[in-house]
Image: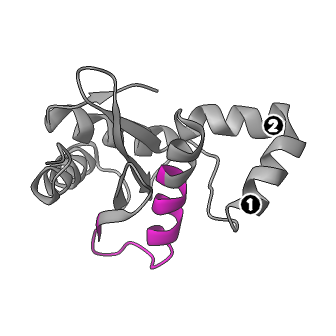
Amino acid sequence: MTELTLAKANAIIDTAFGLAAEQKFKPLGVAVLDAGGHLLAFQRQDGSPFIRAEVASGKAYGALAVGSSSRALGVAAVERPHFFQGLSAVSGGKIVPVPGGVLIRNKNGDVLGAVGISGDTSDNDELAAMAGIESAGFVAKV
């Protein structure tokens, strides 16, 4: 049985939305993907543009694809543009290399999935992802 359940995914989303309300972030879209890159849960707050689903999923998908945060992927995209162009091509353009995509790990360090958030600044998106992951009892590492 998987550790990353639908209930846990929804808890991650609830916490991210709670932080967004508390900190007065712009409306967020939050995607939770399993370790295979499949969508487990997605929600967007009222007033959030429809494109948030694709952007949030792309941040999470990118983190899973390279095994690190989408922040690190963004740095690699700048430092090694040919690598990122190839990665983007083989992924069918699914990867969004900006902060807001964070791996979900268990206490042993195993990757269980990823959270991607889009809506506010990339830094705030990342903070909300980390808060959601940690509140659900998992480990978030950027």
Taking the magenta stretch, the answer to whether it contains residue 124 is no
| Residue bearing the label numbered 2 | 78
Give the mark, 1 or 2, whose residue is nearer the N terminus.
Answer: 2
Q: Residue furthest left?
A: 7
Q: Which residue is located at x 22 percent, y 31 percent? A: 138
Q: Position of residue 97 (x, y in %)?
A: 64, 47
**Left/right of residue 25 with respect to residue 53 in the rendered view:** left
**Could you say whether the residue bearing mark 1 is in a helix, strand or loop?**
helix
At x 78%, y 46%, the residue is: 84
Disc 1/disc 2 C-alpha distance (Å): 18 Å
Inspect the image, locate mark 1, and give the three-letter code of the amino acid beneath it.
Val
Q: Residue furthest front?
A: 1
Q: Are marks 1 and 2 in contact (CB under 8 Å)?
A: no
Q: Residue at x 82, y 52 (%)?
A: 86
Q: Nearer the viewer, mark 1 or mark 2?
A: 1
Residue 82 at x, y percent in the picture: 89, 44
Q: What range is drawn magenta here?
A: 41-60
Q: Is 44 in the magenta?
A: yes
Please name whichever residue, 4 or 141, is drawn nearer the observer in this view of the structure.
Answer: 4
